[in-house]
Amino acid sequence: MTDKRLRQLSELPETKFPFISLYLCINTPNLLEQTEKNRIFIKNSMQEAEARLQKEGNRENLISFRKDCEKILYYLENNLITKAQGIAIFACAGLGIFRIFYSIMPFDNSIAVNSIPHLRQLAYHFDENENALVVMIDRRFARIYNLEIGGFIFDEADMEHEVHKFHKQGGWAQMRYQRHIENQVLRHYKDVAKVATDLLDHNRYDNFIIIGQHNEIKNFQKQLPKRINAKIIHTDSLDMRENISSVLEKVIDDLKENESKKEQAIVKDLIEKAPILSTTGIQDSLKLVSEGRVDLLVLPQNKKQKGWKCNGCLYTEKDQKQAGCPYCGEAALETDLVEELIKFTLKNKGEVELINGKSAEELEHYGGVGVLVRY
């Protein structure tokens, strides 16, 4: 399910004002070096964009762009959340737009100044980093992480139960004391299971991950209803003393593995349903997307494809077969077809799946782009 903030960006009208889409990696092992790289990248990119706007001679656009640059630089200098790995900023003073997205995974540094927001990296980010409920558990302690779309942990809760240590005793006393300890552990598992079940029943989670030692995970799962066990995508062995960075690294690996399986299934479905319920190839896909008939757009995450868009009626095509638009005669301008496909699809309530690895290689044999259609 596409994040509503991403879809809202896709629904923004094409604008005559410069629209800035900025993606940055903001937290690496060598933070000072990365910060300096970002500073140089932003400075050079903004200077290049400003020179182009000055050459175009539109004073109103230049003022709008400069306002956005000032606001972006001020935010990065004074309000940056440093525990994030990536940040995406979308700004257009002419439309009154200034939106921030953070990520626990880094973005590739890029900036686009165009008439539309560039959404590819953000769409990929939301696709790869789905909501997840993570439970770390042992015999007496549990930690629950609530990962929201966008990658940030916005809720973290600890649960601890008093479980007495085992003391050596003899006969009936030892057996009674051991049963007492086992009952305390069981109550702990049941209480944590109830909290996890309530969260999974009343919130939209795409994934459920349990972390702990094998026997403890197994005993905890026995207290979960079947419908909740069915939502588990991974169980991982980690010590409760692991820091949050190690936990997140493991969770991200789990989500990537699960996403890879989903991508392979989607591409297989796309190929098998052609040509009735799906189609492949960029021009046919572009036509269906522009008609609002696409339920799911599938393309490789690093796909690049230039094309042409009419400056008047906004008709878009892969190849420019004549000097002007074939429909209204206006001039056609070069555009990024991948960004156009993504924006059109999201705007028309479709979903976007950006794929990698073997799935992307397989799709390239069929034109590198495919869509599942509604009708």
Image (cartoon, helix red, strand yellow):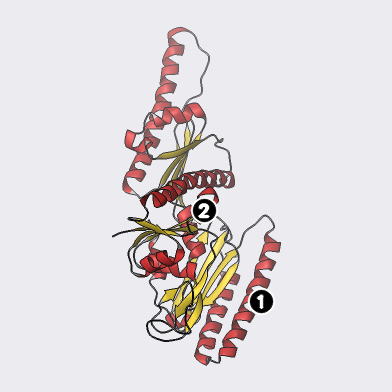
Residue identified by numbered label 2: 360
Residue 278 is at least partly visible in this image: yes
Residue 26: percent from the left, percent from the top? Answer: 61, 62
Residue 328, quarter of picture = bottom left
Residue 152 is at least partly visible in this image: no
Residue 183: percent from the left, percent from the top? Answer: 39, 23
- Residue 22, which numbered label? none
Residue identified by numbered label 1: 44
Q: Is residue 12 above or below residue 33?
A: below
Residue farthest along the left direction in this orientation: 375
Residue at figure coordinates x 44%, y 40% from the top left: 233
In the picture, the quarter occupied by the C terminus is: bottom left
- Taking depth in this image into account, of 139 and 36 the one nearest to the observer is 36
Residue farthest along the top direction in this orientation: 171
Residue at figure coordinates x 43%, y 22% from the top left: 182
Nearest-to-viewer mark from 1 and 2? 2
Residue at figure coordinates x 33%, y 42% from the top left: 198
Q: What kind of residue is marked 2?
A: Ala
- Label 2: few (<14), some or many (≥20) within 10 Å? many
For the residues labelled 1 and 2, the Cα–Cα distance comes to: 33 Å
Q: Is residue 32 above or below residue 210?
A: below
Residue farthest along the front direction in this orientation: 321
Q: Secondary structure at mark 2?
A: helix
Q: What kind of residue is marked 1?
A: Asn
